[in-house]
Amino acid sequence: MKKILITGGAGFIGSHVVRLFVNKYPDYHIYNLDKLTYAGNLANLKDLENKHNYTFVKGDIVDDGFIQQLFAQHQFDGVIHLAAESHVDRSIANPLEFVMTNVVGTVNLLNAARHLWKDDYQGKRFYHISTDEVYGTLGESGFFTETTAYDPHSPYSASKASSDHFVRAYHDTYGLPVVVSNCSNNYGSYQFPEKLIPLFINNIRHNKPLPVYGKGENVRDWLWVEDHARAIDVIYHQGLNGDTYNIGGHNEWKNIDLIRVMCRVMDRKLGRPDGESEKLITYVKDRAGHDLRYAIDSTKLQRELGWKPSLQFEEGIEKTIDWYLSNQEWLDNVTSGDYLKYYEQQYVTR
Ligand code: NAD
Ligand code: TYD
């Protein structure tokens, strides 16, 4: 039985990747390593608790001794690394935490893989999950490709860029079999409501102001999270050693246009008069260093490995809103306690 370590599996994207792998590959044993920070939640994986090929391990990738020991104990054949601090606004408030988890944590995993595999890399793979934000910002036109130069602007994207460089350096220096993917903004179920889409769904539900940064003119390229998980499956199994793949949905939206669509869908679902939720839109101070536009060219992944997004955005956003509305207990649980302190600092005192 192949043993695969997935890090950050209790988070948003990680939980979808763990679910896909556990269900699709009964002959793999999936170990989900997660520190369970504010963003990690075992309720995201309730349906997997009794699966024979799934084990949850609570632990911190920054703890080098623990990581070495975990690799020695379980003798993993592969690693799919998603654990990270992932929210730009939090990185502006506390950059060092991002350096620790995203950079030091990644290097700890690389070292552990290298020591375990001892240069006998047959059948082994270290897959690092990254973001399009490492490429910086686009103007009105153009797309990020795999050869776009790195130009990160936020502490979050700078820490991810650094980790990407370490992963490639371990390939070039030690021959470690690695693959990297850089994906655009994800949306879907189980996303922590600090990110735009679930935050605004939750606020509309509670008739709270919708804090739009700047003029709402920034553009993001949204991909349904389950399509990202499918891409990760394809790249883990078929991606070329040492290669990079960009993942994206060719689905660009100006924030304000996306927010208006969400308001209209929510009005309909909540039985509110048309235009009611739009009244909650409130323009607030812009995010520092706010990248104008992200857009991914995923031609390489589509052409070489045959992946393509399965869902149109209009259908995806309906599905996503339905999920949050029928999982209000999940939303209520993650928006109590520390979340209220975060919200106060991020928005109320702005
Ligand atoms: P998330 O914040 O929802 O989840 C991160 C998970 O990592 C959480 O479960 C958390 O508990 C865990 N974690 C954090 N620090 C840890 C540590 N020190 N040790 C062990 N576990 C730790 O993030 P996400 O949105 O699911 O993103 C997952 C990965 O995908 C990240 O690497 C992120 O950079 C990348 N990514 C995200 C997006 C996006 O739109 N969300 C897009 C492209 C790439
Ligand atoms: P976010 O979901 O934080 O993802 P990222 O910054 O990684 O792209 O934000 C998506 C876009 O929405 C980004 O342009 C910032 C904007 N935004 C707001 O206008 N208000 C908010 O409260 C948040 C969280 C984001």
Image (cartoon, rainbow, N blue to C red):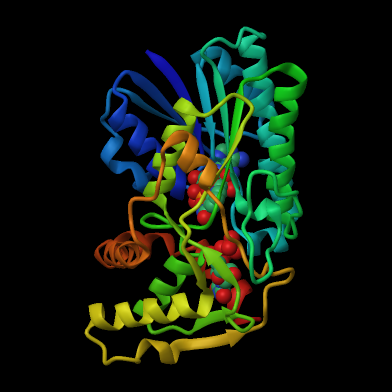
**Residue 227 to residue 139: above or below:** above
- Which is nearer the eye, 231 or 212? 231
Residue 26 place in picture, x, y as percent? 29, 22
**Residue 146 to residue 213: above or below:** above
Q: How many marks?
A: 0
Q: Is residue 297 visible?
A: yes
Left or right position of 310 against 240: left
- Residue depicted at 74% across the width and 49% down the height: 150
Q: Quadrant of residue 279?
A: bottom left
Left or right position of 330 against 105: left
- Which is nearer the eye, 250 or 261? 250
- Which is nearer the eye, 51 or 293? 293
Residue 214 place in picture, x, y as percent? 64, 81
- Which is nearer the eye, 190 or 162? 162
Left or right position of 140 against 125: right
Q: Is residue 38 visible?
A: no
Direction left: furthest residue:
271
**Residue 159 to residue 66: above or below:** below
- Residue depicted at 24% across the width and 77% down the height: 269
**Residue 286 to residue 54: above or below:** below
- Residue depicted at 44% across the width and 18% down the height: 3
Residue 20 place in picture, x, y as percent? 34, 37
Q: Quadrant of the C terminus?
A: bottom right
Direction front: furthest residue:
303
Q: Quadrant of the N terminus?
A: top left
Residue 296 place in picture, x, y as percent? 56, 55
- Residue depicted at 50% across the width and 71% down the height: 253
